[in-house]
Amino acid sequence: MARSKIGSGIDCRIGLIEKAEDFYLGDNHFYLMQINFGEILGNKKGVVQIDYYYQKGDLIGKKVIASVNIVSFPIGPWISEVQILTVCDSQGKRILVVPEKQAIEIGKPLNI
């Protein structure tokens, strides 16, 4: 597991989005995604609200960064097994944090 210098135990990995489904919670639009983290971790489900910048079809095949050692948490009727890293723009809209180079293998840990 990748460890930060302060010993927080955060394990962030590169994953590949293989499936994305729409779901709504009130007026909020979310994507439920199946993300492949490689042989060791396999597929995990992640839920994220990123519909302002991303269409469902644009997400398939995209590499993302996610914290994989969190406690699963519910978002509406779904359980998110990972926390997908995002950053907010000046209007509070979420943007995915993605690896710059696509050559990075899925499942690779971040050096935190």
Image (cartoon, rainbow, N blue to C red):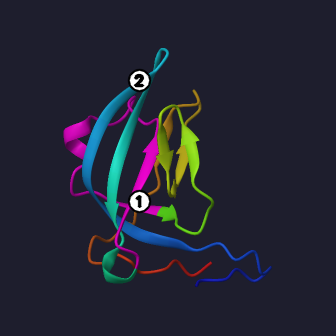
Residue furthest to the top: 27
Q: Dot 1: few (<14), some (14–19), or many (≥20) neighbours within 10 Å?
A: some
Residue 41 seen in this snapshot:
yes
Mark nearer the viewer, 1 or 2? 2
Q: Residue at x 70, y 80 (%)?
A: 4
- Against 44, residue 42 (above or below) is below
- Write down the residue under mark 2: 24
Identify the image quadrant of residue 106.
bottom left
Residue 3 at x, y = what percent? 67, 83
Residue placed most toward the observer, 31 or 71: 71
Q: Secondary structure at mark 2?
A: strand
What span is colored magenta in the figure? 41-65
Residue 102 at x, y = what percent? 27, 70
Residue 21 at x, y = what percent? 28, 38
Magenta highlight on residue 56: yes
Q: Would residue 70 appear left or right of 22 to someone viewing this image?
A: right
- Write down the residue under mark 1: 98
